[in-house]
Image (cartoon, rainbow, N blue to C red):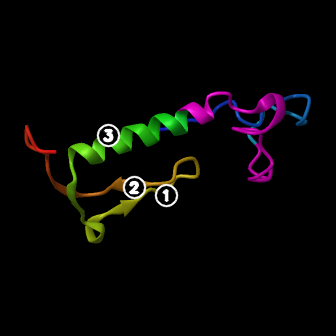
Amino acid sequence: MGLCIISASRDEERYENADVYDVCRGARDHMAFGVGIHACLGSALARLEVRVCFEELLKAIPDYDLDLSRSDRTHNPNVRGFTTLPMRFRPRQAGEL
């Protein structure tokens, strides 16, 4: 899965040469998922959707084990997480509570 943020920090009213990719622009000096008129209206819904998804997933596979010794984190400035996260699980059988 890839994530490409192509429009963050491109507000010409806030940044000089807003369409130019500037590596010297402060990492926290952006408006992606920001505040005010630039706030992401869907961020609360996205967090709720992810929480419900994981709650339901964990109900379906209550027995699981992550193999952190074989995991690999991503080295991407836009995404935090794993590129590899081996997992073993036993799915809930029909009729199990």
Rendered location of residue 19, percent (x, y): 78, 30
- The numbered disc on residue 82 is 2
User: Residue 35, can we see it?
Assistant: yes
- The amino acid beneath tag 3 is Glu
SS class, disc 3: helix
First in sequence, mark 3 or 1: give its number: 3
Say if 40 sits above or below 57 in the image: above
- The amino acid beneath tag 2 is Phe
Does residue 24 show up magenta in the picture? yes
Residue assigned mark 3: 56
- Please name whichever residue, 59 or 20, is drawn nearer the observer in this view of the structure: 59
Part of the protein shown in magenta: 22-45
Rendered location of residue 38, percent (x, y): 78, 31
Spatial distance from mark 3 to mark 1, Cα to Cα?
A: 29 Å
- Please name whichever residue, 9 or 60, is drawn nearer the observer in this view of the structure: 60
Does residue 33 show up magenta in the picture? yes
Q: Residue at x 91, y 29 (%)?
A: 13
Residue located farthest toward the left when viewing the structure as drawn: 94
